[in-house]
Image (spheres, coloured by chain):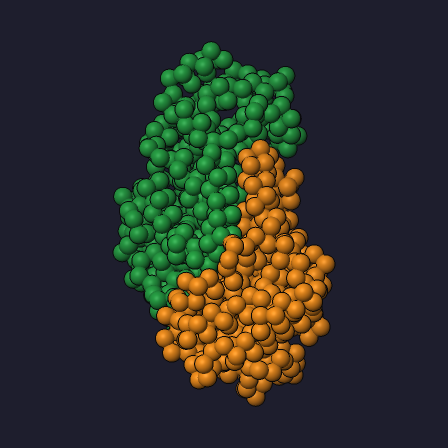
Chain colours: A green, B orange
Amino acid sequence: MRSRAAELDAADGLAKLRERFTLPDGVVYLDGNSLGALPAGVADTTADVVARQWGELLIRSWDESGWWTAPERIGDKLAPLVGAAPGQVVVGDSTSVNLFKALVGAARLAAPGRTRMLVDAATFPTDGYIAQSAARMTGLTVVPVDPSHAAEAMDADTAVVLLNHVDYRSGRLHDLPALTAAARAAGAITVWDLCHSAGALPVGLDEHAVDLAVGCTYKYLNGGPGAPAYLYIAARHQAGFDSPLPGWNGHADPFAMTPAFEAAQGATRGRVGTPDILSMLALESALDAWDGVSVEAVRAKSLALTDFFLECVAAYVPQGRVESVTPDEHERRGSQISLRTENAREVMGELISRGVIGDFRAPDILRFGFTPLYVGFTDAERAARALGHVFG
Amino acid sequence: MRSRAAELDAADGLAKLRERFTLPDGVVYLDGNSLGALPAGVADTTADVVARQWGELLIRSWDESGWWTAPERIGDKLAPLVGAAPGQVVVGDSTSVNLFKALVGAARLAAPGRTRMLVDAATFPTDGYIAQSAARMTGLTVVPVDPSHAAEAMDADTAVVLLNHVDYRSGRLHDLPALTAAARAAGAITVWDLCHSAGALPVGLDEHAVDLAVGCTYKYLNGGPGAPAYLYIAARHQAGFDSPLPGWNGHADPFAMTPAFEAAQGATRGRVGTPDILSMLALESALDAWDGVSVEAVRAKSLALTDFFLECVAAYVPQGRVESVTPDEHERRGSQISLRTENAREVMGELISRGVIGDFRAPDILRFGFTPLYVGFTDAERAARALGHVFG
């Protein structure tokens, strides 16, 4: 398998993108689905933001360094990665906060009289917690659904549907086009959580007529720890989008400082308070790693990597010690492989001590994220081999 | 006045604190009430966070670099500056988002049946916008009040009272102890916005039994552009605090990833999503500028500075060209002087071209913020002299 890996790396058109990142020596980093690696330009950008933009230009930087317009500018820079035309994505706040805006906004966009909010039952927990709060505050009732059967649950009483594009535990990719179409047919508003898909595979928000979406930027987008999240508001919903967090940054004329709120046009109305510039401009710099990269090419490499990793696991790990809970079918697979095993926490500890960084999700899951911008086939082979040694 | 200024600087026990900041040469910076200056250690801290904590340690930094616990740790570091014992302040999100948590939380803490939310009529606009949203979503009605007469408006129908400690336009300091006591006597829950007071004067949250408070960290606390804000939840209210933004970071056991939300104990339940680490750790470093500094000494210097500035303005500016809208009485004055004048925007432009940085607030206000950690009496004299030249 080692020579196969070397051949695959040699033939990989994206292999040279690894130079755009700073990675520690000797480590196989398969946790970019939790915290993406450091893009090469971020350190210089951050140093400039601190020393010159803040330290020297001070307050002038809100205009002169483009701080004020960063949320929309970075939203537009990120938009092609999720298949959105300009003017629909705004960056800022955490994923949870954006989810609250999106869900309350969706409830207010939904046809009056509908009472149900369908929520992915296997969701990353914060989505469920925030959905409960949004439902409570808008008079809806949360109904947990298995995303694979969500379409069957959508009916004339469904106001909002919240789904994850890729499940964080299993790595299962849900059928965004079909589920969005089903929701539309039922007259419901869709909110997609793209945390585990954006930057790993094509999303096609505009193409599939998604209504609203949120996502984080610190996984496959490499924006840095806790980097600002984003909110997508489809152009057709912007005039009607009624945010529960109408902060002054989302006002039509923020510096008029008028007592009454008047929402800005466009995605800007998704803004709330003053953006955290250090994190925001680090993200802007991080997105340079995508210059000239097609998401389709990334997706092709991602599938090749996860296929090859599964092949290596089958070759190296004794039969019956691990079981993949990630779907085999490409059209149902995200960019991670989740293996169920006994003593998963200890196994991951062993792997990490051997320089293979993945993560553990309770109670029994080993997660390995494959980030095609900086992970190669040799990494996949080495990780599987280390796993074999742990069981060997 | 010049020699007086030099004497006052020579006698100023806080003068040496200016060394803790990096300021551009030749500039008098009187806009620290909008964006505080750069503390000296922040550049090195940020470089380390990016290159080593993120770039080398990667995901391990959530534990090993103390990322996960940063919101509470930095909250406790900031707490003495607002007179709070440990365990009541949590850092993260913007001021607007924290205000939403505080106002909805306050409405849920308030006695049932009360219908009114009193809101400072002269408030910085985002507070009013967010208050409208919080009231709408909790069934309350916003009643604008003049803070000077707010006590008279508090009655048995008052659920929540939102006030600014210092008015952003006029620099008027409101009577937090008396207004908080009046609200308590009326059975209402207080929410104080400390944006323009924290770091400039003693706040005494615990001493005066404030219920909830929010504030930003990028003004007198020098945390950097858009640095994370904070939320104070008095210990006695923590068990009952019911956040409208129950994200996974505020869960009692976040990594259990249980489907049902169970709020963490303490101020932690004010957390929402993943904290923006770059901005957060820059703030932590910035707070080192307060080592060994008493807020009382800062307040004494602030009053001396604003007194002296007014004296210089009277000496240098032709009679009748400017009028201070900031109260003369020390007990009603924050740490800024706001001068009303004709053509205020143009006048401020002239001042800035002469190296004196203040700001303009529509329609007719020149704002000069005095930040005692790095502004001296010579600065005040030079600013007033430049203003005199503009009118001369």
Tell me how many marks there are.
0
Q: Is residue B382 left or right of residue B74?
A: left
Residue A357 location, x and y as percent?
Answer: 57, 29
Q: Position of residue B163 (x, y in %)?
A: 55, 75
Give me the residue at 44% from left, 60% from top.
Answer: A272
Residue B242: image location, x then y, percent: 58, 64
Residue situated in front as seen by the camera: B147 or A392: B147
Give the farthest residue toward the top. A3
Q: Closest to the observer: B222 or B23? A: B23
Q: Nearer the viewer, residue B126 or B103?
A: B126
Measuring from the top left, give residue A329's x and y in whole percent: 39, 28
- Report which quarter residue A101 is drawn in: bottom left
Q: Which residue sits at x=45%, y=14%?
A: A6
Q: Tell me the residue at 63%/54% (across/down).
A: B19
Up the image or down, B292 lies above or below A325; here it is below
Q: Quadrant of the C terminus of chain B?
A: bottom left
Q: Is residue A26 above or below residue A117?
A: above
In this rendering, the answer to whether B109 lies above or below A291 is below
Can residue B43 be seen here?
yes
Q: Which residue reaches farthest bottom?
A: B152
Outermost front residue: B3
- Residue B328 lies in quadrant: bottom right
Q: Would residue A58 be found to the left or right of residue A363 on screen?
A: left
The reply to whether residue B194 is visible in this rendering is no
